[in-house]
């Protein structure tokens, strides 16, 4: 077991700011003006889209990090599976040796007359 594999757990990022940009405040003099309201709405939409683009970019970066972590985990699990396979072969060999020794002991005991065996009380 010279090779030790490890995986890195990446914490889920926390939000550092508000979910959406605050809407611009309306002035009393242009409250009834439809063009001004439209400009404010479009400005708010642009801000929301910019925030969404930023969030999508960070999400893609997080997916890239997750991909790297999953590849590392996959390699670690493959190494672990290989080592388990080797151990399985070794355990089978030891079990076969133990069964051979048990058979030898049974045959050795069968060859000794019962009067020569120690009595268990």
Image (cartoon, rainbow, N blue to C red):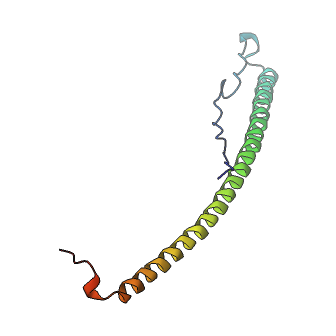
Residue under the image location 28 percent in, 81 percent down: 117
Q: Which of 15 and 107 lies nearest the eye of the viewer?
A: 107
Where 114 sits versus 64, above or below?
A: below
Q: Is residue 24 above or below residue 93?
A: above
Quarter occupied by residue 17 = top right
Left or right: 107 in relation to 121: right
Return the x and y of residue 85 as percentages of the image width and height.
Answer: 63, 66
- Which quarter of the figure has residue 14? top right
Residue located 69% across and 50% down the image: 3
Q: Quadrant of residue 46?
A: top right
Along the line of sight, the residue nearer the viewer: 56 or 92: 92
- Image quadrant where one finds the C terminus: bottom left
Residue 61 picture location, percent across and down: 77, 39
Where 3 falls versus 116 (above or below)? above
x, y percent for residue 41 = 76, 27
Residue 39 percent coordinates (x, y): 81, 23
Q: Residue at the front extreme?
A: 116
Front position in the image: 89 or 63: 89
């Amino acid at each position: 077991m010279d090779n030790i594999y490890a995986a890195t757990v990446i914490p889920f990022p926390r939000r550092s700011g508000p979910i959406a940009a605050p809407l611009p405040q309306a002035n009393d003099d242009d409250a009834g003006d439809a063009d001004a309201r439209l400009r404010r709405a479009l400005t708010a939409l642009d801000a929301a889209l910019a925030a969404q683009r930023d969030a999508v970019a960070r999400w893609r970066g997080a997916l890239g990090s997750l991909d790297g972590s999953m590849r590392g985990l996959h390699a670690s699990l493959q190494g672990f599976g290989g080592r388990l396979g080797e151990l399985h072969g070794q355990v089978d060999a030891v079990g076969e040796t133990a069964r051979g020794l048990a058979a030898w002991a049974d045959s050795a005991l069968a060859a000794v007359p019962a009067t020569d065996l120690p009595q268990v009380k």
